Image (cartoon, rainbow, N blue to C red):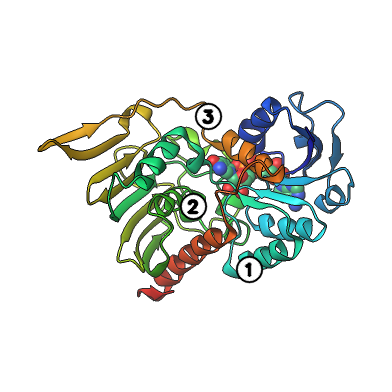
Amino acid sequence: MKIVKIGIVGCGGIFKYAHLPAYKQMKNVKIVAICDIVEEKMDDSDFPVGVKKYKDWKDLLNDPEVDAVDICAPNYLHSIVGVEALKKGIHVFTEKPDAISVAEMQRLMDAEKESRKVYMAMRNNRHLNISKFYKKYIEEGKAGELYCGRCGIIRRRGIPGKGGWFTTKAQSGGGPLVDLGVHMIDLAIYFMGNPKAVAVSGCTYNKFANSDLSDSVNSKFGEKKDDGVFDVEDLAMGFIRFENGACLQIEFSWASNIEKETAFLELRGEKSGIKFSYTPEENRIYTEECGQLVNIEPKIVEPDGGHGQNLVHFIDVIQGNAKPDFTSEQGMNQIKILQAIYESAKLGKEIIL
Ligand SMILES: NC(=O)c1ccc[n+]([C@@H]2O[C@H](COP(=O)([O-])OP(=O)(O)OC[C@H]3O[C@@H](n4cnc5c(N)ncnc54)[C@H](O)[C@@H]3O)[C@@H](O)[C@H]2O)c1
């Protein structure tokens, strides 16, 4: 078994709490190098002993030992580091979002095509056991045609790293639509069989830039900066039409006056409706059996948030043991949707893709 040697760019929250624990369990992976512009971030007793440390990601990419890079840095760096890595013949895994603009996504796709290396972006929701179950259920035709849905992650107060890169448009690409929307919009479209979006309408708001309250454990990511920037939305609402006639209603907030934080995805099929939830006991299928209305309650246990399984899949693909369940075209379709929602919000009209 060949060991895949990984270099990490960005040693913040998601690396420490989701990627590192997953790699530690994988026998066919070795983290050989890490990189962070903040030197102290690389000093952690949990990190592998003897790992090489770089302050500049270009030096990490020049390390001949690195077979694959895992990008856990702020969003704007995903495509920048990804393109350079692919040009050097290094496999790329990046955290979400794939890129912060359609132009940057195109650069990534061009580099991927030329390099013939594996390029993959985090889709941890797809790798949850409940998602695998729903995908199989849908592919077996049990839900019938999925013709519409609604999804969202809405927080009452849960702004990540306020004033830092998360809330700075040039570095993040956007607020909760980019941070949270990529998770649920991707999962909805994946369940629906990847239909092509043809029109998008959206509204975005920024009402809580001055609020420091938090009631969400999920706002722990990123670092706060008191004198920083907040030029992204804190709420995005939208509506997506697909070429097969299906539609998806979306809602993502870091802060809004609601009862409590909720994450939801509901898809309506001709035969069954699917309710996806991060809370295992809330997952349901709504259907009819023997002339009666029936609710199916899947009993499924999750080992983690799907991040680990997604990284295992990336390594399996590199080693030729699995076909990728993700394509960069799907990434591009999503970035086009996100960009069009912002454009629609700015222009006050529906955008035809
Ligand atoms: N899939 C998920 O569930 C999930 C959850 C949280 C975050 N994320 C994603 O992970 C990425 C990182 O988020 P985070 O919460 O860990 O943020 P973070 O701010 O905690 O960590 C980012 C790290 O990158 C470092 N960094 C910044 N610029 C750099 C550069 N030029 N070179 C090297 N390192 C640099 C920072 O010093 C920091 O240590 C983001 O893209 C975010 O969207 C994904």
Q: Quadrant of ligand 1?
A: top right
Query: CA gap, disc 1 to disc 2?
Result: 17 Å
Three-letter code for the amino acid on which mark 3 is drawn: Asp
Mark identifier at residue 106: 1
Residue sticking out furthest to the left = 291
Three-letter code for the amino acid on which mark 1 is drawn: Gln
Q: Is residue 74 above or below residue 278?
A: below
Secondary structure found at label 1: helix
Residue bearing mark 2 = 182
Residue bearing mark 3 = 304
Secondary structure found at label 3: loop
Is disc 1's CB within 8 Å of ligand 1?
Answer: no
Locate the C terminus and report the quarter of the image it occupies: bottom left
**Mark earlier in primary sequence (3, 1):** 1
Is disc 2's CB within 8 Å of ligand 1?
Answer: no
Three-letter code for the amino acid on which mark 2 is drawn: Val
Locate the N terminus and report the quarter of the image it occupies: top right
